[in-house]
Amino acid sequence: MAETLLEELKRYVGFGVEDERALVALHAIAKPHFPRIARVFYDRILEHEGARQALEGGESQVGHLRGTLEIWMSQLMSGPWDEAYYELRCRIGRMHVRISLPQHYMFGAMNVLRQELNGLIDEAYLDKPQALRAARTALGKILDLELAIMLHTYREDLLAQQARNERLSTFGQLVGSIGHELRNPLGVIETSLYILKGRPGAVDERTAKHLVRIGEQVGIANRIVSDLLDMIRDRPLQRQEVWLDEVWQEALNAVQRPESVAVREEGLAALPAVQGDAGQLRQVFVNLLENAVQALEESGGSISLSAAAPDKGMVELVLEDSGPGVSDTIRRRLFEPLMTTKARGIGLGLPLVKRILERHGGGISYQPRDGAGARFVLRLPLLPAEDANASVPSAG
């Protein structure tokens, strides 16, 4: 059986059972000092403008990040150092890509931890040179292992992000050209339809029905063009105080659904107002509702939207439906433009939702439900994005 990357890295740095024992022993000594080390760590980060800018503009306060770092240090020394540990550490590298944190700051930050923890080792094992050497060696190996994992996932995600950006750039150029060119013939069709409908007796009843159908299809085509253009342009956010229960009701009224599809909501009215663009947030709800309704059209079912109380300046909304859900294969590409499994639509609804929420300083993720159905978790800051603070997991 082939070696996993974690096993290869362990072998490369020579991390073994003796190192695990030394770290577990060190954990009991170091744990009371974690809060102090976390303060030193983030104080050092905030001294540097580039690192500070990467941290600010996101989800939580630095106090929350200190708590996350304490958990990270505890896991660092207590293990188990298995594949689940590896996956947990990989998320840190991915987060660094998401917030555009230059990796030299991560190396510098890791050195802060190395210095502080080595200082504890020197003090605790002053009269035990053999234990001191074992603890220092084990700490060096595990921190090197952490750096290797972070750099590996950072590189992977950065390359994937660059590839996506290149595809989106080509997509944008194509859409910009085609979208504007389509506006002209669609405008001519709309004008001709208006003229024909305005002539009493000029068309019989059957022809009139076909004209209505043409008008409906022109409206669909215009909507597709608008969505395409919205994906490639940065419309300025018209920020104002927005009550999400009102925006939800507007979206609900705009989306047609069969009687077999029931919709309910819970907790929206109790939420405080958010600062955002009401029109664009309405589009978020419309797109998600339309997707859910289409998933339930044939079988019927239910759609629910629930709101959680604000946590650390963020509002969390959960939209669920009882439809078939999303397969594992599609899930990883769910928010990519032109990715769709539906008979109609071209795969712009969810990418546009993601773009709007991220421009507000929030985000969206897909979380599978127990059994059938889809679940989307939306997060929005109570304050504008530029006034919030980013959440960065632990070391870096």
Image: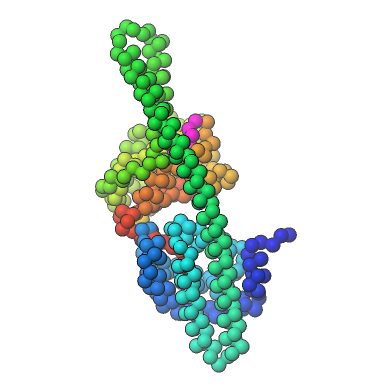
Residue drawn at the location 31% of the way across and 58% of the way down: 387
Work out whether 118 lies above or below 216. below
Q: Is the magenta stretch mostly helix, strand or loop?
A: loop
The part of the image, by quadrant, that contains residue 218 is top left
Q: In the rendered view, does 114 fall on the left or right side of 57?
A: right
- State the image coordinates of residue 313 (x, y, percent, origin top left): 34, 58
| Magenta highlight range | 344-349
Q: Is residue 176 magenta?
A: no
Residue 296 seen in this snapshot: no
Residue drawn at the location 42% of the way across and 69% of the way down: 67
Q: In the rendered view, does 188 fall on the left or right side of 141?
A: left
Farthest residue to the left: give it. Answer: 240
Return the residue nearer the eye: 288 or 259: 288
- State the image coordinates of residue 376 (x, y, percent, origin top left): 46, 47
Say how the picture is coloured.
Answer: rainbow
Farthest residue to the right: give it. Answer: 1
- State the image coordinates of residue 375 (x, y, percent, origin top left): 48, 46
Q: In the rendered view, does 320 fall on the left or right side of 20?
A: left
Residue drawn at the location 61% of the way across and 83% of the way down: 134
- State the image coordinates of residue 273 (x, y, percent, origin top left): 28, 50
